[in-house]
Image (cartoon, rainbow, N blue to C red):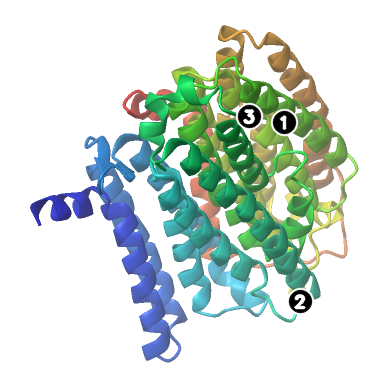
Amino acid sequence: MEQLLTDTWLTAPIGGTILLSLIVIMINALKKDSLAAEYWVSLIGIAANIVLAVVVFPDRGTAFSGMVMTGGYASITAILFLTAAGLTILLSREYIEKIGVNFGEFYHLILLATTGMMTFSAGTDLVVTFIGLELMSISLYVLAGISRRHHKGNEAALKYFLLGAFASGFFLYGIALIYGMTSTTNILEIAQNMQAYMSEPLFLTGVGLLLVGFAFKVGAVPFHMWVPDVYEGSPTMVSAFMSTGAKASAFTAFLLIFTATFDIAGTQINTVLAILAVASMVIGNVVALSQNNIKRMLAYSSIAHAGYMLIGLTAGGMMSITGVLFYLISYMFTNIGAFGIAAIIENKEQGGTEIDNFRGLYYRHPALAVMMSIFMFSLVGLPPLAGFFGKYYIFVAAIENGYTWLTIIGVITSMISVYYYLRVVVVMFFQTDEEAEKSSLASSSVFALLLSAAGVLLIGVFPSMVLDWMSRLF
C-alpha cells in the first residue's frame, strides 16, 4: 500500500491531468452554459499540474514496477505538454466561438490528449507507451473533425484516423515481435542485452516497425503525406496543438527508446534515421517554398523541423538528447504563437489562412506583426532567438559524433527556408490591404501570444534557463 501511494505521488502530473479531464467533462454534463467554468478549471488545473511536475522533478526513477519513468525527463516533458495545452486553451477561447465549435468537450479532449502525451513519453514499458499513443491519437482524431459542418475538417479527421490507425498497427506489431524475441516489453530490461538482440533478424524487424510508427507520428518523410492536409483541414488551434504537443510527445518517446535506452550507434537503424533526416529536411523545405496557405506552409515546415531533430537522434549521446529537448521547447513556443496569430486572422468560415491575408497586418495590428516576425525568425534559426540555439545544439552534437555531412545538409536546407519565412514578414510590413478591417483582439489571446513571444526571446537570450534543468534528466 505504501509503495502504491509513493508511485501515485511520483506520477502525480499524469494522474492529476486525467483527473482534471474527468472534472471538466462532469462540469459539462451537470452545468448549463458551462464553457466559461470549464475554461477556467482547465487553466487552473494545468497550472497546478505544472507545479506538481516541478515538485517531483528531483525524484528520478521509475514507478509501478518499472513501467513509468518519474521525475527528471518525465517532469520536463510533462511541463512541455502542459504548457502547450495551456497556451492552446488560452488561444482557443475566442477562436472556438468564432468558428462555431464552442463545445465543452473541446477542453476535455485537449486534456485527454495531454494525458496521452505524458504517458507516451514517460513509458518505460512498450505496452504503456502504446496506451499513451492511442489515448493521444484518438483524442486528436476527434479534435481534427470537431467542426462537423466543415468539409475539410471531416476530411482531415478521416485521413488522420485511417493513416494513424495504420501506423498504430505497425507500432503494435513491432512490440509483438520484440516481445517474442526478448520475452519482455520493458525497454530498460531489453537495453541490458541489446548487443545480443541486435544480431537477431526478428528483433531488428520489430524495431524497424516501431521506427515506422514513430516516423509517422513525427511527420518524417516518407510517412508525411497526412501532415499538410490534416493541418490545413483541422481547426487552426487544433493544428497548433498537433504540431507542438503531439510532435513533441512522439519525439520524446522516440528519443527515450532509440537514443537514451537502446544503443543504436553504428547500426543499420542509425543509417535509416540519417536517411529519414535528410529526406525530411530537403522535401519539407523545398515543397514549403510553393505554399500559399500559411497552415500548409507551417505543415511542410514542421516536416523539415522533424528532419533537424532526427539529426539529434542519429547522432546519439547526452548532447543530442539535450539538443532535441531544447529544440522541442523552443519549437513549442514558436509554432503555437504562429498558429495563434493565424487563428486570429482567420475568418468565421475557416478560410482566410492564405499568406495574402497577412497583407498589411503591421498597419492594422503592429504588435501581431512584430510577434509573427519573431516567430518566423526563430523558425529560420536566427540568433538570438530560441530557434537558433535549438539548431546549434543539435548540429554541435552531430559534428562531435562524426555526422558533419548531416550538419552541412541541415545548414543548406535552413538557408532555403529563409525565403518562405521571410515572405510572410514582407507581406505583413511592405504590402497593404485597404479592404481589410481592423478587428478586436481577445485579452486571453494577446496574453498567450505575449507568453509565447517571451518564451522565444528569453530561452534564446538565456538558454541556461533550460539547460540547467537538462543536466539533471536521468
User: Identity of the amino acid at label 3?
Assistant: Leu
Q: Position of residue 325 (x, y in %)?
A: 49, 32
Tell me the quarter of the image containing the C terminus: top left
**Dot 3 surroundings within 10 Å: few (below 14), some, or many (20 or more)?**
many
**In front: 136, or 196?**
196
User: On the rendered structure, is 226 left or right of 141?
Assistant: right
Disc 2 is placed on an element classified as loop
Relative image position of residue 275 (x, y in whole percent): 74, 26
Which quadrant of the rendered structure holds the N terminus?
bottom left
Image quadrant where residue 169 sits: bottom right
Q: Residue at x 68, y 9 (%)?
A: 404
Give the left or right position of residue 12, taking residue 338 as reference.
left
- Within 10 Å of the Cα at label 2, are there few (<14), some (14-19), or many (20+) other Cα atoms? some
Kind of residue indicated by mark 1:
Leu
* Among numbered discs 3 and 1, the one appearing first in the sequence: 1
Residue 390: image location, x then y, percent:
57, 27
Residue picked out by circle 3: 310
Mark 3 and mark 2 in contact? Answer it, CB < 8 Å. no
Tell me how far mark 1 sits from mark 2, CA to CA. Answer: 34 Å
In depth, the one of 161 and 18 nearer the eye is 161
* Residue depicted at 41% across the width and 28% down the height: 191
Q: Confirm whether residue 265 shows in the render.
A: yes
3 and 1 marks in contact (CB < 8 Å)? yes
The span from disc 3 to disc 1 (Cα, nearest Å) is: 7 Å
How packed is label 1: few (under 14 Cα within 10 Å), some, or many (20 or more)? many
Counting residues from the start of the chain, the first of labels 1 and 2 encountered is: 2
Q: Is residue 384 visible?
A: no
Residue under label 2: 150
Residue under the image location 71 percent in, 63 percent down: 162
